[in-house]
Image (spheres, helix red, strand yellow):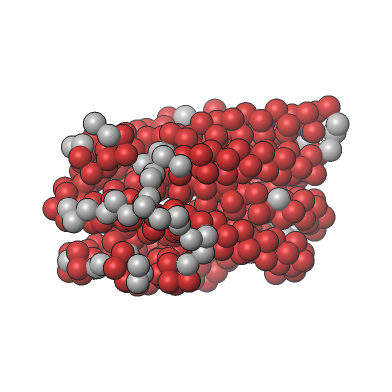
Amino acid sequence: MDKKQKLLTQAPGRALFFFALPMILGNLFQQFYNMADSVIVGRFVGENALAAVGASYSFTNVFIMIAIGGGIGASVLTSQYLGAGKYREMKTSVYTFLITFAALSTLLAVVGFCYNPAVLLALQTPDNIYEDAILYLQIYFTGLPFMFMYNVLAANFNAMGKSGIPLGLLIFSSVLNVILDLVMVIHFRMGVAGVAIATVIAQGISAVISFTILMYQLRSYKADQAPSLFDVHMLCAGVKIAVPSIVQQSIVSIGMLLTQSSVNQFGSSALAGYSAGMRLESIGIVPMIATGNAVSTFTAQNLGAGKKDRVKHGYHVAYQIIIGFGVVLFLICQAFYRPILSLFMDTAVSSVAFDTGAAYLRFIGTFLCIIGFKAITDGVLRGAGDVNVYMIANLVNLSIRVVIARLCSPIFGIQVIWYAVPLGWLANYLISFGWYRTGHWERKQLVEDTGR
């Protein structure tokens, strides 16, 4: 069997699971990569350093999700051209969006570097961690183009059905990041600045290696004519998918950012616990989001090949995969929350932080299936290029989370902030599922709309 055609020919359940598995492992390493900063400063520097990195994380994660969402959205074209066997157009699509995101990431890096102090002030960041949070962000934003390009490159590998390549690269970069974190913090005693520098170095090396491998992989797709380096028609078609995909991928992190001021009012100890719980939530949703992204690529390739019934079969099987992951994650959150949280803090000393993190983690762990159902439904719509309604659904999700956190947490306490999360997920899923049931996505002809 041609390895390039597995998403088109294997049994949908097998194809989806084994395509999603490297993405899940890769995204887990991405989260460990990001989480290493918090674990190391929390254990070797202190609670305030953990809170400073946590306050920064809500802001930086927005940019990470923009990169992931933009890459996934733009790579839908790559998947559909691959499914249709149009290799010249597929290569042109890859080149067009690499150039586009290189320029966009540079612009966002400048904006983030210049305005992060104002954002931290607007979020009412506690005074005792404000300077460290600024320092972390300023170093982080110098390396933003590397992080952006790595995620866009990874999305292209996944669109080509090669999800194992990003996994290998993430394992390498994660291990490198942890080693550099430990050296910077323990040996050089650089604290928050040290973990930020380590992250930038690891991301830069990963981006360069990823680009080299992608250029080599593209040579195996033979085309009758040389591809173009940039195509405005493809850019316009891709942007229509990428913008809603960015919104969908960013909803969690934007919600975290916009509710940050609601958390900050409870003090740095509560913020430290919330930050730990938030990082662990990010790990918990990895298999859900990765399965949704796998469904997106599966949908795009099979629609490109004209196999609509196969898309429906894959979508139904994806529910079984999500439920399986949800049961396992629920049991882990309920049984092992204490040793997991102890990675971030001394539970005997940081009692407020621990209680906050434990309450967050145990509650969210109960509802992770809902975000999985949302992710796979959004994945079908995104893979088909039918993105307008699902973008609205994600905005409703965000609005519910922010409004409830802002209005209710001062009255009922910090726990209201995470009570709103599954309500937003559920509303998002119901809207997207209702639109899926209309069958409108089946009538999309995205590849022809590019004008190629």
Residue at position x 40%, y 55% from top? 225
**In the displayed structure, would residue 330 be above or below residue 430?**
above
With 12 as the anchor, is 133 left or right in this view?
right
Q: Is residue 381 visible?
A: no
Q: Nearer the viewer, residue 286 or 358?
A: 286
Q: Nearer the viewer, residue 95 or 208?
A: 95
Q: Position of residue 152 (x, y in %)?
A: 52, 52
The quadrant the N terminus occupies is top left
Residue at position x 51%, y 64% from top? 230
Q: Position of residue 214 (x, y in %)?
A: 51, 42
The quadrant the C terminus occupies is bottom left
Q: Nearer the viewer, residue 169 or 188?
A: 169
Residue 8 quadrant: top left
With 329 as the anchor, is 235 left or right in this view?
right
Residue at position x 61%, y 34% from top? 173
Q: Nearer the viewer, residue 261 or 297?
A: 297
